[in-house]
């Protein structure tokens, strides 16, 4: 590395090679950067930025309340990120492949974007407003950014395990690097010099120029930028210099972890992220010890349960919504799944507003019971109930197939419970009867529960009343919290007010399912459901689950429109909670879905947001 600490005129991009520093060009690999594609690329950049805004709105809606064929993502910026990168995130403003049409179709479902002829203008206006607000009206998107922004923008962060607090309260250690492609290097240089100030020093690495700038507000950091061909690097000077060196050998893109993750990411996506999980976990513990030495240390993973070596995620636009996939290598203790279409959705009422489904409930519960039975002192803690857990009385769940926890809404009231497929109904009835008989000999906070039953449907609905357990629950919460973190008497009183005066469970085994609810209404709704009026036929459910992937190892569904409707009728309406600008957009969110699968090599979670057609 040749270093010149002088102040000559900054090298112009025109004097730099288009692909990067040419040192040892004959032997060093050079990654060809993204080339501009004229007006079409500009349009795609605007649409992608608008989609980012919609993704933020959708995430807000999710907080309030499928599988794309892998093709390997092609990134022009990942080879520039140093191999020591811990977290990498990238947005593809060039909208590769089918994302151009998908974004346009998706935006057309939102207010103000239905006129495709005026779409670019409206997106420009929306992005311009956001940029103006974020910059305090000091940056004009159309004048300062849009003319030169290329097809990709990325952020790389590394060396997080070196982060610590200095004596003056600043933070030292770690590094961050902002990367971007540019379609006009000269305009980019003019913008950076105008925004960051004239360079105070320059460093040359081969023929690449690293410009150091004065940034007094960034304590303990030496900030620099460089334009190498059509690649822009901004961040810690050491990180910028490392990026220029890294590109010669492929940088992060050439590492085993990132390469394996990239093979899972389809080339056609809007944004992606990657993280080195073990390093990130170590960095989190080190940072906590450095930043808050008096705080309790973060727990370490038990032996044999270390985090996967990496995790990656990506966002795609779809004509009917958007999806977020999260993928990581499958840990050895996670069983390979057997994906299939839901068998429970046809048994849940069409008025279901939320449901979480898992496959093979019996096997799942039995594994949990077996693990719990190995805990020291379990028998002493459970007393008379221990034989149910430790298997001394045999398995009580061998009959259970797929199951779901569901919430229904009827007449403005919410009901909830559990529905489990009974692969062998007669066996299920026998096992449940045995548990009921066992409960007759178990004393609760108010003595033995009161059991009543009445005929309904093809069987009997049983109600088990445990009486008023509010004081017992409050005591359990206080004992669990303990110490300085224990809730006050006033807090416990407020919790007590939220609990029902009588704790009951209602259940039945009939028509091929076991149903357990907090009240009789839920149980009756499930018993009365037919395939024709079930959740499986509901358009909102279908829209979300079809996006998430109907064949899976487990899934979840939320009727977003119903949740927002309930919020709008609450004491504080959705407009007051979300804001007048956001509420019209969230009002278009139809439903949310999630699907989980465990394959031989990876585990995969897909989150989906279905948007209602106009």
Image (cartoon, rainbow, N blue to C red):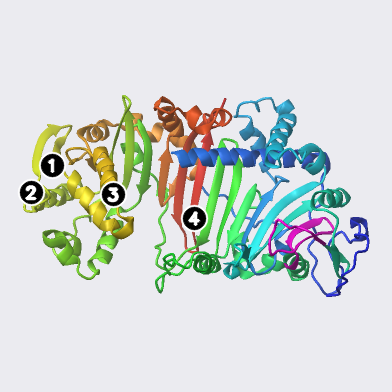
**Disc on the earlier residue, 3 or 2:** 2
Question: What distance separates the C-alpha of mark 3 from that of mark 2?
Answer: 28 Å
| One can see residue 211 in this view | yes
Closer to us: 128 or 462: 128
Classify residue 373 by image quadrant: bottom left
Q: How many residues crowd mark 4 within 10 Å: few (<14), some (14–19), many (20+)?
A: many
Return the residue at label 1: 467
- On the image, the x and y values in percent for residue 438 come to 9, 53
N-term mark: 1 or 3 = 1
**Residue 264, position as x, y percentages in the image:** 58, 58
Contact between marks 1 and 2 (CB within 8 A): the answer is yes
Q: CA distance from mark 3 to mark 4?
A: 42 Å
Q: Is residue 213 magenta?
A: yes
Q: Residue at x 90, y 59 (%)?
A: 10
If you read the primary sequence from the N terminus, does the residue marked by circle 1 or circle 2 appear first? 2
Foreground tag (4 vs 2): 2
Sooner in the amino-acid sequence: mark 4 or mark 2:
2
Residue at the location (32% across, 44% down)? 405
Q: Secondary structure at mark 2?
A: loop
Disc 4/disc 2 C-alpha distance (Å) = 46 Å
Q: Which region of the structure is painted magenta?
A: 212-238
């Amino acid at each position: 590395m040749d270093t010149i600490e002088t102040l000559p005129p900054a090298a112009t991009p025109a004097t730099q090679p288009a692909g990067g520093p040419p040192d040892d060009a004959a032997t060093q690999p050079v990654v060809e950067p993204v080339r501009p594609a004229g007006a079409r690329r500009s349009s795609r950049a605007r649409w992608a930025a608008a989609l980012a805004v919609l993704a933020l709105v959708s995430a807000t809606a999710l907080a309030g309340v499928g599988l794309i064929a892998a093709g390997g993502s092609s990134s022009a910026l990942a080879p520039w990120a140093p191999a020591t990168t811990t977290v990498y995130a990238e947005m593809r403003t060039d909208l590769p492949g089918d994302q151009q049409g998908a974004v346009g179709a998706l935006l057309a479902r939102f207010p103000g974007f239905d006129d495709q002829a005026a779409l670019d203008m409206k997106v420009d206006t929306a992005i311009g407003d956001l940029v103006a607000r974020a910059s305090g009206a000091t940056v004009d998107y159309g004048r300062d950014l849009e003319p030169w922004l290329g097809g990709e923008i990325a952020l790389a962060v590394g060396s997080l395990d070196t982060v610590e607090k200095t004596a003056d309260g600043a933070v030292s250690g770690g590094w961050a690097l902002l990367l971007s492609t540019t379609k006009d290097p000269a305009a980019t240089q003019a913008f950076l010099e105008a925004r960051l100030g004239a360079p105070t020093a320059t460093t040359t690495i081969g023929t690449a120029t690293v410009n150091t700038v004065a940034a007094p507000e960034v304590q303990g950091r030496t900030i620099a930028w460089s334009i190498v061909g059509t690649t822009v690097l901004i961040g810690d000077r050491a990180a910028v210099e490392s990026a220029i060196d890294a590109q010669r050998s492929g940088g992060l893109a050439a590492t085993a972890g990132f390469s394996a993750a990239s093979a899972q990411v389809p080339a056609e996506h809007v944004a992606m992220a990657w993280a080195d999980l073990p390093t990130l976990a170590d960095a989190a513990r080190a940072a906590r010890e450095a930043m808050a030495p008096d705080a309790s240390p973060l727990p370490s993973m038990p032996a044999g349960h270390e985090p996967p070596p990496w995790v990656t995620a990506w966002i795609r636009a779809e004509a009917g919504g958007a999806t977020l996939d999260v993928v990581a290598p499958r840990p050895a203790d996670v069983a390979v799944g057997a994906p299939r279409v839901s068998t429970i959705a046809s048994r849940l009422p069409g008025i279901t507003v939320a449901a979480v489904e898992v496959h093979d409930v019996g096997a799942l519960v039995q594994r949990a019971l077996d693990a719990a039975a190995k805990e020291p002192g379990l028998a002493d803690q459970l007393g008379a109930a221990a034989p149910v857990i430790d298997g001394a009385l045999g398995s009580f769940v061998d009959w259970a197939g797929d199951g779901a926890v569901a919430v229904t809404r009827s007449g403005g009231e919410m009901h909830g419970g559990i529905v489990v497929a009974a692969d062998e109904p007669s066996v299920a009835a026998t096992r449940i009867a045995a548990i009921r008989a066992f409960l007759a000999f178990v004393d609760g906070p108010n003595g033995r529960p009161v059991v009543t039953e009445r005929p309904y449907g093809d069987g009997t609905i049983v109600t088990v009343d445990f009486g008023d357990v509010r004081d017992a629950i409050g005591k359990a919460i206080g004992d669990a919290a303990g110490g300085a973190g224990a809730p006050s008497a006033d807090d416990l009183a407020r919790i007590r007010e939220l609990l029902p005066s009588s704790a009951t469970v209602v259940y039945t085994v009939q028509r091929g399912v076991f149903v357990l609810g907090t009240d009789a209404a839920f149980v009756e709704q499930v018993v009365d459901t037919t395939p024709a009026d079930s959740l499986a036929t509901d358009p909102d459910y279908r829209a979300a689950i079809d996006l998430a992937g109907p064949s899976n190892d487990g899934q979840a569904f939320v009727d977003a429109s119903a949740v927002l409707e309930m919020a709008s009728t609450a004491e504080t309406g959705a407009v007051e909670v979300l804001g007048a600008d956001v509420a019209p957009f969230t009002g278009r969110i139809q439903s949310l879905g999630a699907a989980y699968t465990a394959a031989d090599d990876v585990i995969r979670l897909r989150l989906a947001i279905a948007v209602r057609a106009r």
